[in-house]
Amino acid sequence: MKNKFVVDRLRPFGETIFATMTQKATDAGAINLGQGFPDEDGPRSMLEIATQQILDGNNQYSAGRGDPLLRSAIAEDRYRRFKVEYDPGTEVLITVGATEAISASVLGLVEPGEEVIVFEPYYDAYAAAIALAGATRVAVPLKEDGDTWALDIDALHAAVTKKTAMIIVNSPHNPTGSVFSKRSLEALAGIARAYDLLVLSDEVYEHLTFNKIEHTAVASLPGMWDRTITVSSAAKTFNVTGWKTGWALAPAPILDAIIRAKQFMSYVGATPFQPAVAHAVVNEKPWINQMRKNLQTKRDVLSEALTHAGVKVHASHGTYFVVADIGNRDGAEFCFDLIERVGVAAIPVQAFVDNPEQWSSKVRFAFCKKEDTMLAAAERFRAAGIL
Ligand code: PMP
Ligand code: GLN
């Protein structure tokens, strides 16, 4: 229903698909493989430090750019893994989740009327951030590539205009589970350099790649450090989606523009979580590795159960999502029906696109739940027969 109070630029955005599906799943007692959040906690040491920080009185505003300990931990980690250097004093910003890093980047760096290219299907927060900035979203569809998806570099090239200011890219990719090849990201980088574009690289799933597939940090590609904003978050790496602790890394002048927006959105994020995340970034690599292994097993359990239930399953090389193709049916109707009939919630991929035709038969399932939860979901699929 039309609400006269909503400003024009937010009119296209109703309740998020995640909130809708989670509510429906809760009401129906369904297993929630829709919204991507884990149902088990992150490393114990990290939880204990956060608790202790609160009890010890670290409960006031942090430094404007975030806890220096966390900024240093992130900068060192980036250097160790990708050989990209960031000064923790001027080139790292702690944000209220990756979501705020994304919104503040678009608000601080893109003028009203400029264009931002996103790859479709795209994470829903990109569209809202672009709309809030009064900018224009230009969606370039991913292309199917075997049993996964790839960047369509020709289509990207064709989408660039004089008004293009930024490309937003997300690898490992939500919702498809694709991990874009280094070569294709290099091609994207070539276009960004040729047309002098900023690139916002959303790397929240940077640690969640499977079968020895490597994550590529866009800022590490030749000529890209200068023009890349890298966004990530503790949410997916340490199972703390509710801590809303994320970050942005960029050269000082670019980060300065992002801070201009961020400081008035939230000023700072929650203080006591930051030393805890810093500890985890430095010390909990073995925990991350174990989680990644467990996720791979759960991906296989889910993919097999879906295949047995008669739907085509695409490969998931990263993130904690797998996409199924339900043939000649509508994904949204299928998802509503699945909750009632089978007791499992999923997300229709068409919620993330401007051009639904190519995507209306695709449905995203999350496999970041406990093994028991995944086995229970698999059992529900088995009991339901052909989906
Ligand atoms: N980007 C992508 C691709 C995501 O899937 C999510 C959701 N976790 C976010 C950003 C937002 O991350 P956060 O919860 O840290 O705000
Ligand atoms: N990133 C999560 C997902 O894709 C959910 C985030 C949200 O609910 N906004 O499922």
Image (cartoon, helix red, strand yellow):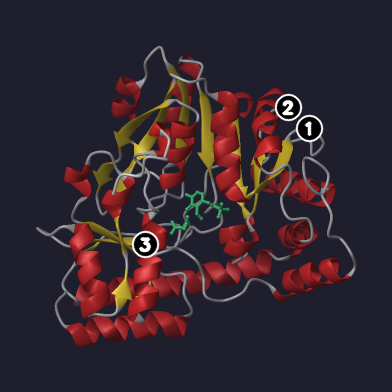
Identify the residue under disc 1. 90
Q: Position of residue 127 (x, y in %)?
A: 41, 38
On residue 20, which mark appears?
3
* Disc 1 secondary structure class: loop
At a point 68% along the width and 39% down the height, the residue shown is 83
Q: Secondary structure at mark 3?
A: helix
Q: Residue at the top extreme?
A: 162
Is residue 366 something that shows in the picture?
no
Residue 251 visible to the viewer:
yes
Query: Which residue is pictured at 82% across the width and 67% down the height?
Result: 54
Q: Mark 3 touching mark 2, by CB under 8 A?
A: no
Q: Quadrant of the C terminus?
A: bottom left
Identify the residue at image location x=35%, y=65%: 21
**Gap in Å between the C-alphas at discs 3 and 2?**
39 Å
Amino acid beneath label 3: Thr
Residue 291 x %, y %: 56, 70
The answer to whether mark 1 and mark 2 are in CB contact below 8 A is yes
Label 2 crowd bin: few (<14), some (14–19), many (20+), radius 10 Å? some
